Image: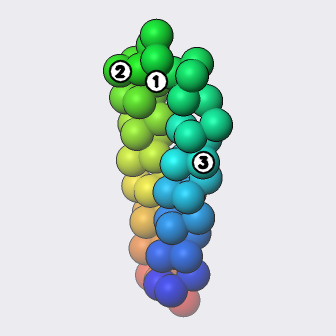
Amino acid sequence: MEIILQLVIKIVEITLYFLNVNSKLLVENYNLKITNIFNFFIFLTKKILQTNIKLTIYD
């Protein structure tokens, strides 16, 4: 579980870094891009958690 949390934290850091670097580009399509990034983040988190659950069951 600790590894999963570290991975999620890294994803958040990378997402924030991406937002910071591309802040000028994001101004025009700000809402759309933010929504897409967070939808992707939620999707990825669900996948990580599903994988973790599967691994737990099989272990």
Residue reaching furthest top? 28
Question: Left or right: where does residue 15 sit relative to residue 30?
Answer: right
Q: Report if the CB atoms under discs 1 and 3 are less than 8 Å apart.
A: no
Residue at numbered disc 1: 33
Q: Residue at x 46, y 23 (%)?
A: 33
* Coordinates of residue 11 in the picture (x, y in percent): 56, 57
CA–CA distance in space, label 3 to label 2:
17 Å
| Numbered badge on residue 31 | 2
Mark 3 lies on a secondary structure that is helix
CA–CA distance in space, label 2 to label 1:
6 Å
Q: Closest to the observer: 34 or 27?
A: 27
Q: Is residue 13 visible?
A: yes
User: Up-down: is 36 above or below 32?
Assistant: below
| Numbered badge on residue 17 | 3
Image-quadrant location for residue 25: top right
Hey, what amino acid is under mark 1? Answer: Lys
